[in-house]
Each structure stands twice: as structure tokens, then as C-alpha cells.
Amino acid sequence: MAAETLRDIVRYAAEQYGTQAAYRYKVNKEIEERTYDELNRDSMAVSRMVEQLGMKGRHIALIGVTSYSWIIGFFGVTGSGSVAVPIDIQLPAAAVCDQLNRADVEMLILDELRADLIAAVQEQCPKVKVIVSMQGTLASEGGVLSLPMLLEESQGISTYEPEPDQLCTILFTSGTTGRSKGVMLSHRNLADNATSLDLRIPVGTVTMTLLPINHVYCLTMDIIKGVYIGVISCINDSIMRVARNMKLFQPELVLMVPMVIESIYKKLRDVDPNIPKALVAKEVFGGRLHTICSGGAYLDPEYVDKFAEYGITILQGYGMSECSPVISTNLPWDNRRGSVGKLLPNCEAKVVDGELWVKGSSVMMGYYHMPEETKEALEDGWLKTGDLGHLDEDGYVYLTGRKKNLIILANGENVSPEELENELNRSDLVKEILVREKERVIEAEIFPDLEYAQKCGITDMKAALQKLIDDFNKNMPVYKRIYSLIVRDVEFEKTAAKKIKRF
């Protein structure tokens, strides 16, 4: 079926998968399920609720962890012709209010984990007229409404049909530099991104959500594509309980960002080498995991080989919020090492002065209320990704770094900091690294792996890291050598996608 809107996708899923489980999640240690029929029914109830509250066509924010309530809220808001504005639950109140105001939000659906936001929003966001609690226990406080109660009152068929090219969502980028921008995506942008490529994932495949739901990679691939292809999506209730929930839900496929993959491998590596790797994988991943889709940042290809030893395939992909987000991905039957995958069928690309430009039905409408930034990012329908790289003759994409991070030395040489970071990050002693220019030389700032250092009896951390840098420099041309080292004692500040912020 050609699905052009998110409403099309939810309706199609109900018709195709009906009483099959769509979601599994824990409630007081018990596992509950919601079927595709219930997803369709409940999201339509949210659409009717939005209409009855007089908010149809308005901008409606959602703040919360991944939950069934958040998911039906998103599908219901977008299905009503309103614009969903997902907000990062970890943001401080001032940043939340800033984004609500910048996105012209008039209604907020809120997880009570952030009940602290209610007073701040009522005081600082004059456009917000309605606040709805996902759990409903705060419904008696300060005019806050109860989502469960409203859903009961709003059961029935929603007849509204969104147009494919109308604004569907405003997603704030979690950029590594500068102020976040509100990426405007249409129904077609998201629907085409989720449906244009057949990954041959069988109906009923069990997956588990690990990424923040406000992040477009999770939203499009875990949620929207997951619904379209009929997976059983298990909701991880806490980043602190990933290992426990892996054993409980036994997923076959998960989406991860590279930092999580690297962290997991270090734990795998530390297991007694005499234990068969198949047993280690079963203990860590629940026994059924066979595929990890990696996105959000670049992953060293060595991890593809390392996880293969445990019987797990890593499919590395590439994308950005401005492209809904997937631009390219490796495939189970064609996993090209070193690349970030083959272009999606709805996407074309070219290289302009070393920068990758992409075009297609998933490219954003623009940045909300930011015409200059939109003009800078889009040219004749082409999205300037800001990523440096090249394409091979088969349409596979290879990346070398970010254009705006490029170090231009006094002698005119260009150095990609990501190239140096990826090389040094292979050392077990390096947990996180940032390379930049400082006072006309290249500097590396490193947060070491303290557990590894302790295990190896390293007492002089600066000396150990300096030796690592010195050995690295021996194999590098003079202009790529690192001449300054800073050793951190705390982790770097990161975005929601777990990428280090560059200031």
C-alpha cells in the first residue's frame, strides 16, 4: 500500500495486523500488550480529543519518555491535522519553555515525570492554553486535564484525513553546535522515509526501543516504520534497566547509537575469554538478538567485525533530522564495510566541493521561523548536509567528517577532526575524545576509560595518554599531528543522540 500520511500508516497496520501485539511494556513488573487495533482506536480517540478541546490544526507538544501514551498522543495529534512538537524530556525548564514559545505551541501533553514544568509553562508560555497529563493523577491541580479520562470521552471514528504535504511535526535538532533549530517535516517526508525501503523484516519481529522518542531516528524507524511493517515493539522503561529488559523481552532487532554500541562492546570484551561468545551474547542480549541498526553518528567499521564474532549483524546507516532522517543504510544482504550504506530509493545525492548534498521526498520543508537558516541549508531542493564524503558507483555513501568542524591550518592544509578521533578512539584507554584547533595547532581533549586504566595498573594517566598521542603522531604527516593534550576527569556534555557537543 502507498502510505502518504501517518494516518494512512496506522490504518494500514490495523487492517493488516489487527489483533497482533503492537507494543509490550511493563506496568508494576507485569507485561502489558496493546494490539494494532487498539493503536488505531486510541490514536483516533486522541484526534477526537484534540478537536473537542478546540486545538485542531494547532501546534501541540509532547514531553515524556517512550510510552504507549506518548505514541498514541503523537499519532493522534498528527492524525487530527495538528502539528506535533516532540520535546526532549531531559531539558531544563527554561529550555523547554524556549522551545514551546519558538514553536508556537498552544497545547502540551505531558508525562508526570516532568510535573515540575507545569508551573513554569503556565508562567512563561502564554500561548499554551491546555495542559494534559498522560497519567492523569495531576488532573485536579491548576487546570491540568487527564489523558485517560479524555480518551474515554472521545472514543469513536475520526474522519479527518491529513494532506500528505501538510506540516506534520516540528522536531528540534540536538545539534552539537549552536542553537537548536525546529525542523519542519510533512506527513509525506516521514511516511516516505519509513516506507520507501523494504528491509525484509518479517511481521511479528520483536524489537526494543532504546533511543529517546523525541529523537527522529527512534520516531521514524522504531515507531513509524515499526508500525508499518508490523513489528512487536517492546518499550524499554529506563536506560538503567536495558540489560534486564533485554533478557525480559528478548528482542531480535534493536536500534542503537554508536556510543552505546561501543560501551556494550567494552563489557563483552571484559568477559572471561574461555566462555563461548555465543553464551556471552545470550546472557547480555537475551538470546534472540541478531541485528543492530546503528545510526545517529559514525561507527568505526571494526565494531561490525567485533559484533559478528558474537553472531550479531550491525547495519550502519546515515541520516539527519532534516531528511526525516534516513539517507542511506546498509542491508542484511549487502552490508558494505566502511560505508554508511546505500541511498534510500526516494533519495538522490551528489558531492559539491567535497560536501554531500541530498534530494528527495524526505527532505524537510525548512526550519520553523528561520528563513535565513533555511535558505542556507536548501538550494533548488537540495539539502546541504554539512557532511564531507563521497559516493561509489553503486550509490553507497562514505563519510569523512563534518564541513563545519574542518580544521584549516595556517599552511592551508585541511584536517578532519573526526578522522583523528576515530583513529585514537580505537585505544581501550580512550572513552571519549574531541579534536580541535587551538592556537594554530591541533589539540586533543580526552576522557579516559578509568576502569580500563585501573585494570591495567595505569597510575600516570597524562603520561599514558601522551604516549598514545606520540605513537599516533609517528604514523601521521606533520600537518595531522596532535601537539596539545587535555585530560578530562568528567564526561563531555552530549546531545540527546549521545553525540559530544562541540562549542
Image (tube, grey):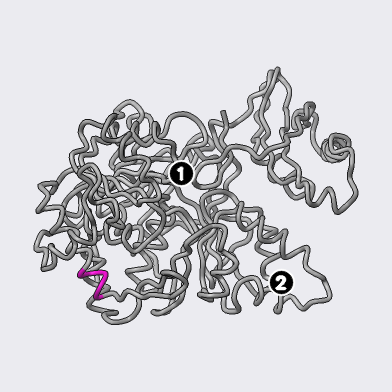
* Whole-percent x, y for residue 425 in the image: 72, 46
What residue is rendered at 36% in x and 45% in y?
115
Q: Which residue is mark 2?
A: 309
Which residue range is magenta in the image?
A: 37-41
Q: Quadrant of residue 72?
A: bottom left
Q: Percent x, y for residue 53?
A: 12, 49
Asked if 411 appears above or below 166 in the picture, the reply is: above
User: Nearest the camera: 5 or 138?
Assistant: 138
Amino acid type at circle 1 is: Gln
Q: Residue sitting at 78 percent across and 26 percent down?
A: 484
Dominant SS type (magenta): helix
- Front residue of 171/210: it is 210
Q: Locate residue 232: give its quadrant.
A: bottom left
Q: Amino acid at mark 2?
A: Glu
Q: Residues within 10 Å of mark 1 (few under 14, many from 20)?
A: some
Q: Is residue 244 left or right of residue 225?
A: right
